[in-house]
Image (cartoon, grey):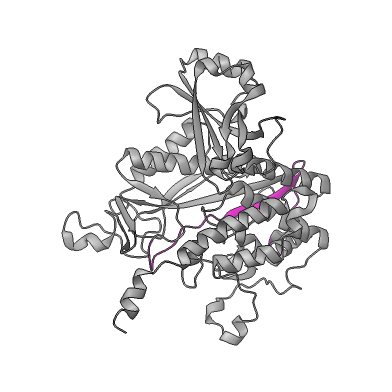
Amino acid sequence: MFANIDQAQAFVKQHGIRMVDLKFIDLWGRWHHVTISVSEFNPSLMENGVGFDGSSVGFKSVRAGDMVLIPDLSTGFMDSFWETPTLSFICNTMEADTKELFAFDPREIARRAEKYLIESGIADKSIWGPEFEFYIFNKVTFENGVNVSVYRVDSIESNWNSAQGGHGHFIPLHGGYHAIPPRDQLYNLRSEIVTTLEEIGLKIKYHHHEVGGPGQCEIETPLLDIMSAGDASMLIKYVTKMVALKQGQTATFLPKPLFGEAGNGMHFHQLLRKGETNVFYDPAGPHLLSNTALYYIGGLLTHAPAILGITNPSTNSYRRLVPGFEAPVNCFFSSGNRSAAIRVPKYATEPDKVRFEFRPPDATCNPYLAMAAMLMAGIDGIKKQIDPSAAGFGPIDEDIFSWPSEKRASILSLPTSLDMALTALEEDHQFLLEGSVFSEEMLKEWIRGKRCEESQIRIRPHPYEIELYFDL
């Protein structure tokens, strides 16, 4: 939005801004914020930043937790959810003493991945198109204690409410894809989300009801560069949740909030450009893909089990990655097959838009780290010229679930638990360390934190266990 502090201060004066909100992402993918009075928004801020305790968000130890935030002026937007006129920025996290970018800052890791791409000579820019699936519920309750473990969600769209009477236009399980009003009762809410996003400068392609009958929705942006895609991911989650809250509802991007219903993915469309040329495009190639694109696919699928430790970093992620819900469970690529880990869209035939999508990720990921990891795997595949067909990754355009089990076993499976994904990441991460993009220290901290989460789930009795075993 702004090229320098002078432009930003002129905007502040012109629009009567009273507060400046500074948002920043922690290692795990959550936004935090601190708000300063407009009187503190000056050139000194851009040099000295605003101090915060990095240990409280997982960045530092308690003994040396001092860090500072410096706003990225290009990310400025009016935060319409505030009653007081507020200008908001996404920040870079910096070392308090040296004012150098913090090595674990997720946005900085994404920058380093892009720099490594440029230095490789393969391309100048990586282009991304994340898809955002989420559920809108009318109410959510949950409780966990010594003697209780329960959650419940409700949706006015779901046919589980049909016996209560009312309008009669309920959506059955799996029946929500592109549902039309009056069944689709969330169209106004989605339009408000999109309008709010467009008002702050983010372009949106479309929105629609998704497969999940009880309130599943999707929003998609045009293709973006890596930093814009990461920032857009955080903005879309923020605006979606805030608009829903304003309307007395609640939004979740949780991969699998409902048993037996479609889960929420975060598919990442991706391609590489050199100058104005899409280096993934070859009119004579299979599915219009160049050798560079195929090698990238080879790298992505070779390292997919490890990558899932970053792109699917919650225990709930693996409730979604199960057969029967268009969620990928095997490492292969295909043209149009939605059960493939990588799908080449048949509709993307223009030279500048030929691409593929990596379908396993979900929105519990840190988007900057997820894209950096996928890009590093793709670069590794290009450098090593990993032919995906020779490596046994397809293309496969058949329904693999109709195959005999012994034939299906010939395809590499994706991890079926967070523990398996983290073990794969421990065993296969050298490709992430190239160019000092990721570091051993950062990956160890990531794995430690995620194993801690996994262990807390593992030691708790599950409600279904009580149903299964209580009478034994």
Q: Is residue 11 left or right of residue 163?
A: right
Residue 322 shown in magenta: no
Q: Main SS of the magenta segment?
A: loop
**Highlighted range, magenta:** 258-287
Q: Quadrant of the C terminus?
A: bottom left
Q: Residue at x 79, y 44 (%)?
A: 118
Q: Nearer the viewer, residue 79 or 296?
A: 79
Q: Nearer the viewer, residue 446 or 183?
A: 446
Visible in this render: residue 225? no
Q: Is residue 146 left or right of residue 355?
A: left
Quarter of the image holding residue 414? bottom right
Vertical comparison of 429 with 395: above or below: above
Residue 282 shown in magenta: yes
Q: Number of callouts in the render? A: 0
Q: Is residue 272 left or right of residue 212?
A: right
Q: Quadrant of the N terminus?
A: top right
Q: Is residue 169 left or right of residue 8?
A: left
| Residue 271 drawn at (x, y percent) | 68, 51
| Residue 384 drawn at (x, y percent) | 82, 62
Visible in this render: residue 86? yes
| Residue 116 drawn at (x, y percent) | 78, 46
Quarter of the image holding residue 175? bottom left
Vertical comparison of 113 with 292: above or below: above
Q: Residue at x 61, y 64 (%)?
A: 422
Furthest-left residue in this view: 165
Vertical comparison of 447 with 121: above or below: below
| Residue 184 drawn at (x, y percent) | 32, 52
Q: Residue at x 68, y 71 (%)?
A: 393
Q: Nearer the viewer, residue 211 or 214?
A: 214
Vertical comparison of 321 with 243: above or below: below
